[in-house]
Amino acid sequence: MDPTIKLALETIELGKQAIVFCGTKSSAEKTAEEIAKKIKVKAEKEKELLVLSEQLLHALDKPTKQCERLAKCVKKGIAFHHAGLVNKQRKLIEDNFRNGTIKIICATPTLAYGVDLPAFRVIIKTLRRYEHGYMEWIPTLEYLQMAGRAGRPKYDKIGEAIAIATTEAMKDEIIERYIHGLPEEIVSKLAVEPVLRMHLLALIATGFVRTKNDIIEFFKATFWAKQFSDFEMISAIIERMLNLLVKIGFVKKQKDVYRATRLGLRVSQLYIDPLTAYHIVNCIKVAEKAKKEPSALALLQMISHTAEMRPLPGIRAKEYDELQEFLFKHGEELLEKEPSMWDVEYEDFLSSVKLARLFLDWINEVDEEVILERYKIRPGETRAKLEIADWLLYSASELAKIIGNKLFVSVVKKLRLRMKYGVKEELLELVMLKDIGRVRARMLYSFGIKSISDLRKVEKERLEKILGKKIAEKVLLQIE
């Protein structure tokens, strides 16, 4: 028997719970399924697990294959957990692990950060992952985070963290690298340029610093300066960032004093990368010059080609031709010029087009199972991107207000609603009702019920046949 499965079953026999850490989402799912096959649930637990299984299955308007696989595992008290699940599913799994209903969670390392769960045992299936073209050992700090999930003070007096080794050589390497090894140094996030740009603009916008000397003195006292030690290099980086902020119009310099412009102040308040804001401003100006309403594709590609959306979806070999053909047909709609295919930025640009197409499918009511198959992006990951997209669209609307492009603001407002509900424009009025998602709204529309006014005219019995009695009653209460 696979040692991971054996240890998981042994944990259940002890009356304890375990988290199994796996290297990938697919590995977490497969491991959970393999453990679930070996479990026989006690009769008194079957009903409770069945209720939970149904909740997880119907967390989306229409269950995907991933939902079905999760629901099947949970009937046996086993679950998988990763970023591909939607928030509702992740919370249900975590809450039911805490109350003891779920015995084993098979998860990716994301569960190792900031979640306090009653795991007596942590089983680490692998300490290596595929990066930069080959298998690499994970950082020691990451191992310590995972191991630290075992035996939490609130739940257990002791805990066990077990790393799986398949050979003696691997065992020795794990002991040396992770048991006796030291964690890596923590690196200041100010070393990341988008973060530095945002903080520098914020310091100027709030009036906390006014002169270059103020700025230098502030950064001298940071962890970044202490860690980097070469302050001449840091000063040169800050000088370059200051010049950039002036050049793109978010900061102005009068004599020796730096002040944020009106646009710069709003960018700082929106908490987006100044280069993202500059990109959006340029796109707004292109739309203004064209004197026509920007398309949904244009706006979605605009927000997809930003630092906030990283990591962008990868492009598989067979997708290159398909994306280039798509650009040939729709490239003129975009608000930014397509770079040369020899440009280092071209791959990022293509990835932004791929993500924009995913968003376009979402607002055109393409089934989530189809989206998963087409783009290899799970529902939870889609939801995470949609949240970022909403903030970027809101930011674009705010910047357009300052520039004075009312048409742009109006188009973005409508697109935000479509992105929120995942519907075509014709369903917007219906999805505003509580408990009417994209699937039920389309169902109503297909029966000729296209507005609140139409709903008021429908007989109760007919509405119950379409939506079911409980949902129909809730809808009727809202439109009285």
Image (cartoon, rainbow, N blue to C red):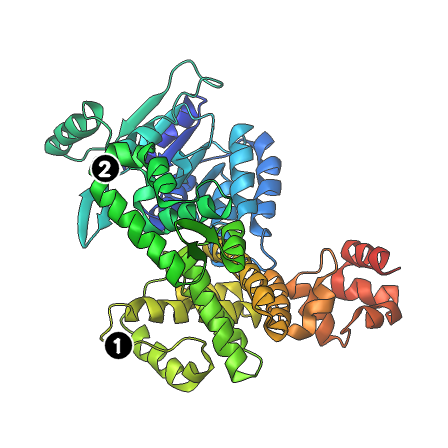
Query: What residue is pinned by disc 2?
Result: 228
Amino acid at circle 1:
Met
* Residue ID at (73%, 66%): 430
Question: Are the residues at dot 1 and dot 2 in contact (C-beta closer than 8 Å)?
Answer: no
* Residue ID at (51%, 81%): 289
**In the image: residue 86, left or right of residue 463:** left
Q: Which mark is residue 244?
A: none
Query: What residue is pinned by disc 1?
Result: 341
Quadrant assignment, res 109:
top left
Q: Which residue is more in the foreground, 34 or 334?
A: 334
Residue extending farthest to the top is 157
Where residue 286 sits in the image (x, y, percent)? 48, 77
Q: Which residue is more in the foreground, 295 or 116?
A: 295
**In the image: residue 23, left or right of residue 62:** left
Tell me which label, 1 or 2, sits earlier in the chain. Answer: 2
Residue extending farthest to the left is 169
Q: Quadrant of the C terminus?
A: bottom right
33 relative to 374, above or below: above
Where residue 372 sits in the image (x, y, percent)? 44, 62
For the residue labelled by badge 1, is the local secondary structure a helix, a strand or a loop?
Answer: loop
* Residue ID at (60%, 70%): 404
* Distance from the alpha carbon under mark 1 to that under mark 2: 37 Å
For the residue labelled by badge 2, is the local secondary structure a helix, a strand or a loop?
Answer: helix
281 relative to 129, above or below: below
Amino acid at circle 2:
Phe
Q: Residues within 10 Å of mark 2 (few under 14, many from 20)?
A: few
403 relative to 51, above or below: below
Where residue 185 sits in the image (x, y, percent)? 24, 32
29 relative to 367, above or below: above
Answer whether residue 467 is visible to the viewer in this image: yes
